[in-house]
Amino acid sequence: MDPALALVTILGTLAIGAMSPGPSFVVVVRASAGFSRRDGLAAALGMGCGGLAFAGLALAGLQAVLMQVSWLYLVLKIAGGAYLMYLGYRIWRGARTPLPTNGGQPTAAGGWRRSFVVALVTQLSNPKTAIWYASVFAAFLPHPIPTWMFWTLLPLIFALEAGWYTIVALAFSAARPRAIYLGAKLWIDRFAGGLVGLLGGRLIMEAVRGRIS
């Protein structure tokens, strides 16, 4: 495959994966609608950094390591699932708690830095994402990889991940979406917390079933 066409194909495939609803989407939406546009943009930056880390690890051959050392993949899946369940529990438990305000505007405890860290850890909590990146690279990267493509791919992936979640942050930090969130915070947070917790539980169950089989 022509390297330029391969690059477009990789970015298009990864874009579809990034846009699929999951814990990352929930975290960015909650930071944007629940707190502020600044928090949402910080979360989007965290997602971009997480995607960059996974892409770099995939290029470095993490998939081969995880496939050879099966117990490491098991541990990572369980740890990631446990974190998502914990995050879901925190969101659910805080559903009834009014958001702290500063001059009438909701503010996150810890500010935008906490939103960045939560987003980054959420993105990194699912080792299946590393396998997804590695699989896409294995399917479409030309061999050998042209030097220009090696240095171009990672920045573009960061821009793709951060760019998509920036769009999400800008959309959900607008006045109307924020008002809807604040008006229905109890049920939205319970739904979001339950969804994130279920996704974490699913990750753990997949690890256990894989171990049994």
Image (cartoon, grey):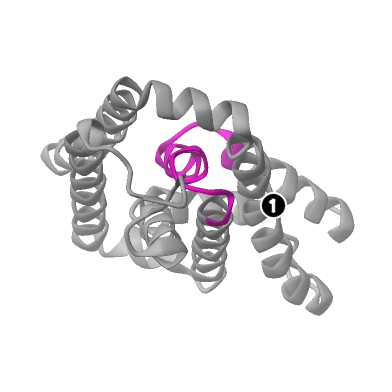
- Mark 1, other Cα within 10 Å: few <14 / some 14–19 / many ≥20: some
Q: Residue at x 33, y 48 (%)?
A: 100
Residue 18 covered by magenta stretch: yes
Observer able to see residue 63: no
Q: Residue at x 26, y 45 (%)?
A: 84
Can residue 123 be seen? yes
Residue 126 is left or right of residue 137, and the answer is left
Of 69 and 20, nearer the camera is 20
Q: Would you say 4 lies left or right of 21 here?
A: right
Residue beneath the point at 65% across and 49% down? 166
11 relative to 194, above or below? below
Q: Which residue is mark 1?
A: 163
Residue furthest to the left in view is 212
Q: Position of residue 135 (x, y in %)?
A: 54, 50
For the image, the number of numbered tags is 1
Q: Is residue 174 above or below residue 3?
A: above
Q: Is residue 88 magenta?
A: no
Q: Residue sitting at 69 percent across and 52 percent down?
A: 163
The local secondary structure at tag 1 comes to helix
Residue 103 lies, in percent from the top left, at 47, 52
Above/below status of 172 relative to 5: above
Q: What secondary structure is the stretch in magenta mostly built from?
A: helix
Image position of 112 (left or right of 187): right
Residue 69 locus on image (x, y percent): 26, 64
Which residues are the magenta region? 17-38
